[in-house]
Image (cartoon, rainbow, N blue to C red):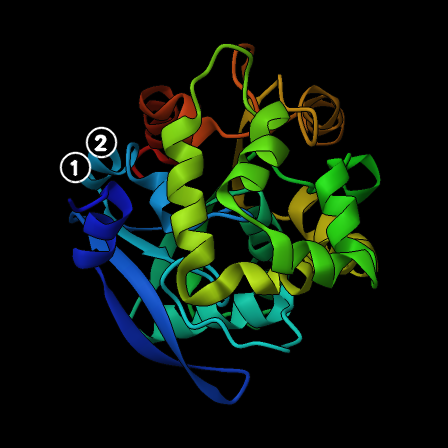
Amino acid sequence: MTTEIEQWWAEGERITLTVSGVPREVFVRRAGSGPVMTLLHGFPSSSHDWARAAPALAARHTLLMPDFLGFGASEKPADHTYSIHEQADLVAALWQHEAVRSTHLVAHDYGTTVAQELVARRAEGASKSEITSLTLLNGGIYPELHRPEPAQSALLDPELGPQLSAALSAELLAAALAPTFAEGYDASADVAAMWEGLGRDDGHRNAHLLIRYIDDRTAHRDRWVEAMETGDLAKAFVWGLLDPISGAHIAERIAERMPDATLHALADVGHWPPLEAPDRVASLILAAVGDR
């Protein structure tokens, strides 16, 4: 029996993109028609996170939903130095491949950090594709406020990290992610899909390499935060307040530092708005981008 994520993969394709000078096989799912909207996923999942919100968004937009390098159905090089800059290169290469002149940029979790790098490049005049709006959902956009779960901290440990990656299983992943969903939400299907994506081609063995994005956030904090907070880019935030990692405490900072941005606080949602409240999320994203 075909699973939902297998069907998702069947309806997309792997394309070859040159990323940091190296040809890489990258999965991309396309849908819809209209102005382009690029949707970036989180850790440790994949573009499949957008599956439930995609139909409503695709009614008005052409959707581009890639899997980052090391995630989902994209190539998963071992012993590789994964970085946010490289993932931003991947997105930029995708835009060039698809001849995207302009796009709305929507991102969750890990993807919000990639989006911050792309916005910084825009501010520096280094982007070939115009970003017309930015919508972010639950991510560590202020790294000093990020509260990693114990499993994330363990993966970052030079000795424990590789051991934990090698030992990862569906059960361990479910236990690690359980606190990040709102109480009462049944995440079993979501976590099963995440494990299927993470475990594909033994990708779970790279988890300790992929988690290094947390260090990237600290190293590039000032440049990324300044680019996000300043400039003329229309910004909206769709934020699950029950998220223990990047929830209400980061929403408070957003309201304080970017009072002119649109902030939609989801009081009953945890770390995963696209999964926990896809219909509301789709409506709020569409409202945020408007007719731009």
Q: Which mark is residue 15?
A: none
Residue type highlighted by circle 2: Ala
**Quarter placement of the C terminus:** top left
Q: Is residue 111 left or right of residue 25?
A: right
The residue labelled by disc 2 is 56
Location of residue 88 by image quarter: bottom right
- The one nearer the camera, 81 or 280, is 81
Q: Residue at x 49, y 10 (%)?
A: 184
The residue labelled by disc 1 is 59
Q: Is residue 26 left or right of residue 85?
A: left
Location of residue 182 by image quarter: top right
Whether 91 is drawn above or below 149: the answer is below
**Residue 124 makes an appearance in the image:** no
Secondary structure under the numbered disc 2 in the rendered image: helix
Q: Position of residue 58 (x, y in %)?
A: 20, 41
Q: Residue at x 42, y 19 (%)?
A: 186
Q: Residue at x 26, y 38 (%)?
A: 54
**Quarter placement of the N terminus:** top left
Labelled pair 1, 2 in contact (Cβ < 8 Å)? yes
- The one nearer the camera, 90 or 120, is 90
**Residue 151 makes an appearance in the image:** yes
Crowding at dot 2, Cα within 10 Å, few <14 / some 14-19 / many 20+, comes out as some
Q: CA distance from mark 1 to mark 2?
A: 5 Å
Q: Residue at x 69, y 29 (%)?
A: 254
Q: Position of residue 55 (x, y in %)?
A: 20, 35
Location of residue 72 by image quarter: bottom left
Residue type highlighted by circle 1: Ala
